[in-house]
Image: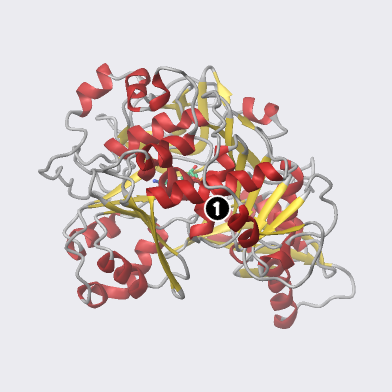
Amino acid sequence: MDMEKIPAREGNHNLKDYERARQTFSWDSIKSNFSWFETGKVNMAFEAVDRHADNPDKKDQTALLFSSPDREEKLTFDDLRRESNKFANVLRKYGIKKGDRVFLFMPRSPEFYASFFGIIKVGAIAGPLFEAFMEQAVRDRLQDSEARMLITTPDLLKRVPQADLPALEKIILIGEHEETVDQYINYKVEMEAAANETEIEWVDLEDGMLLHYTSGSTGKPKGVYHVHNAMLQHYATGDWVLDLKKNDIYWCTADPGWVTGTSYGIFAPWLHGVTNVVRGGRFSPDDWYHTLGKYSVTVWYTAPTALRKLVSAGKETVEKYDLSALRHILSVGEPLNPEVITWGLKAFELRIHDTWWMTETGAQLIVNLPCLEIRPGSMGKPIPGIEATIIDNEGNELPPYQMGNLAIKKGWPSMMRTVWNNHGKYESYFIHGWYVSGDSAYKDEDGYFWFQGRLDDVINTSGERVGPFEVESKLIEHPAVAEAGVIGKPHPERGEIIKAFITLNDGYEDSEALRDEIRQFVKTGLSAHAAPRELEVRDTIPKTRSGKIMRRLLKSWELGLPTGDTSTLEE
Ligand code: 6R9
């Protein structure tokens, strides 16, 4: 689509001269913004919380503006320091130390953020999980990471496996619960007894901080391992891309179970000491507009799937609210449709800035900057310090307009350092010093990058990454299902929806009731977002000679596209 380019706004952007910054920039130049600059010893929690709480001008500023349909709370930087100190002391009391994995399985809440920073303060590694996960998803992640502790709520405890987790010593419960099991610890009781001060564990820049499990096209979800050094890039992009300024009220709509909810829902805003809005509960256009208006949000980071729903809700809905404080909007997770950008110009009189990055990359890499023109449909340009290109499968760089693998020159601060328990997998991402993203794209003659699709079978439904293998594995656990092949099918609002093709075991007949039951089985066994919206019963599932499900072929059939090379198709 040939759309009008949208010029940069006038304004006092933090990054004004992109070309110059790219030429002169080095990551070392960011270091002087941090307290560890001289000593080399660091802790992300100190930089994001305590440093502001130590500053008399900042300590009473609101750090967290939390609200959900049934709760509203404000925490200053001083409150957040104290609460995370207390939690660090609780963890220490139970023997948690540097390098241990501590997982969080709970809805967004002030306790989540206190616990999260408490974990980091003792030098442990935080593993945030989506609250929507069902037992199998929780088990896979706790098993692989060998988590020693889990923080959850009595409600969600039902989905925490009771067996097969030998490493899991304690479960901290936030909220009232009746059972008195040795393994359980009561959050409130422990926090009341804990001291307000703690010793921060000073670690090295390369020490672990965070494990984000994400889906690949094969195998179980993988643990993407991030280190404290990522803060350099969280800080830099908070400056250049989010364009954060001292008095901003910032809202990132992402859940901390997703990397966007940690890198940009926690680290970037708090490294900059801005007020961070967190809204719990379910999405609705009115609720979101209300949140933007009520808190006078100035900078808003969200996702195409939500933006598309706001577009559907129409201009009448947005006009009910006073969004005059809003000055900067960003998007991530999926391609941002040009139509949505056009709508944003009308509805908010603002540009929507697309940003591209991945769980593995830890922070934004290719973005639309406030100081550059936007070409609707393009992800933008690499930030200073990042070299991006398009390569073929042999690692040769391709000229403008040729589609190929989107690749990044190895060596940026927020890059994952390994895949937990699977360093070989980590190494497989690189070719001739390039990190190969798995996305296909091309660049134009001015260096703007244009996303074309995923090269593997990973599904992106409403901005969430779902591995087809995980869904297929769950499907075939159902007694009626013999084989399953799962694809992403394009959908106007959700990006993609999950469509599953199955074959049935002898003795079962296709019926709507059976299909409903199977869908429900995935929903309760894995998670709601992984449940196939469409389920089709077939006689066979196409497979390669080596037995791999040919999802590509299923997809071509589904979409009525040419089937391409079927030489590996099993007879
Ligand atoms: C941060 C995040 C990564 C995958 C990525 C790509 C897709 C993300 C995008 C985008 C088009 C954008 N993706 N941003 N596609 N335009 N601006 O999303 O991480 O959940 O790991 O997903 O999402 O396919 O490879 P993650």
Q: Within 10 Å of the Cα at label 1, are there few (<14), some (14-19), or many (20+) other Cα atoms?
A: many
When the figure is inspected, residue 29 is found, relative to residue 173, above or below; the finding is above
Q: Is residue 8 left or right of residue 313?
A: left
Identity of the residue drawn at 17% across and 49% down: 4
When the figure is inspected, residue 232 is found, relative to residue 359, above or below; the finding is above
* Residue 93, x across and y down, in percent: 69, 44
Q: Is residue 370 left or right of residue 464?
A: left
* Residue 460, x across and y down, in percent: 52, 54
When the figure is inspected, residue 394 is found, relative to residue 146, above or below; the finding is above
Q: Quadrant of residue 480?
A: bottom right
The front one of 361 and 152 is: 152
The front one of 144 and 533 is: 144
Label 1 belongs to which residue?
Answer: 257
Q: Quadrant of residue 420?
A: top right
The front one of 212 and 380 is: 212
Mark 1 residue element: loop
* Residue 121, x across and y down, in percent: 55, 38
Residue reaching furthest to the left? 10
Q: At label 1, which amino acid type do we have?
A: Gly
Q: Is mark 1 within 8 Å of ligand 1?
A: no
* Residue 466, x across and y down, in percent: 60, 53
Q: Quadrant of residue 516?
A: bottom right
Identity of the residue drawn at 31% across and 47% down: 274
Q: Is residue 415 left or right of residue 7?
A: right
Q: How is the image coloured?
A: secondary structure
The front one of 128 and 185 is: 185
**Is residue 214 in view?**
no
**Is residue 346 in view?**
yes
Identity of the residue drawn at 50% across and 61% down: 109
How many numbered discs sit on the rendered protein? 1
Identity of the residue drawn at 40% across and 17% down: 38
